[in-house]
Image (spheres, helix red, strand yellow):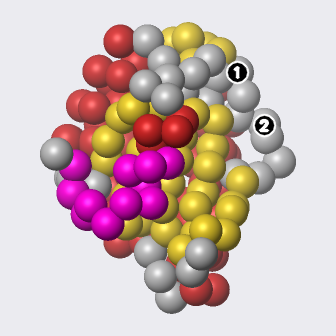
Amino acid sequence: MDLNQPQPVVMKLTNEMLIHITLAGKIFSDQKTQIQGFADKVYATVTDSYQKTGSRVKFLTNLTNLEAVDETFLDIYGELLQKDLPYVSKSATYGSRITILTAFSTLSIVSGRMNFRHFVSREEAMDWLMSDEDMPK
């Protein structure tokens, strides 16, 4: 599991901010405290970037090495997607297995995130994030 990275990575892209996180391994309910702490750290990073720039941020999530998640992770991540919606202009994920992709797609629908899209590669995700396209196809 990769929930202990010191801080989600914030990158400046022209006049916009991109927040990049990586999720890896198996993330289950026995790690609920870590999952919630990580979600809180991500939310703080998103809102801090928004407050500093006055602009909504873009969000990139690497799922390449994410093996499995359970309902506890999905509940907490779903809450994060709802909470940070006003501060995020686009969210893209890339990599991972079909079951993980299905879970993240479901989360985006349930949370009302119409600005969320999944890609096979990081390059495709970055191309979409940097494009003028506001909504997924």
Image: magenta residue range: 126-136
Residue 52 x/y as whole percent:
63, 86
Q: Residue at x 16, y 45 (%)?
A: 137
Instruction: Residue 47: name its quadrant.
Output: bottom right
Q: Is residue 29 magenta?
A: no
Count of marks placed on residues: 2
Residue 64 x/y as whole percent:
57, 21
Q: Report which residue position mark 1 lands on.
A: 1
SS category of the residue bearing label 1: loop
Instruction: Residue 17: name its quadrant.
Output: bottom right
At label 1, which amino acid type do we have?
A: Met
Residue 65 x/y as whole percent:
62, 18
- In the image, residue 109 sits, relative to residue 57, either above or below, namely above
Density class for disc 2 (Cα within 10 Å; few <14, some 14-19, many ≥20) is few
- In the image, residue 130 sits, relative to residue 92, either above or below, namely below
Q: Residue at x 44, y 49 (%)?
A: 127
Q: Report which residue position mark 2 lands on.
A: 4
Q: Is residue 129 magenta?
A: yes
At label 2, which amino acid type do we have?
A: Asn
- In the image, residue 64 sits, relative to residue 12, either above or below, namely above
Q: Residue at x 55, y 11 (%)?
A: 67
Q: Is residue 38 left or right of residue 15?
A: right
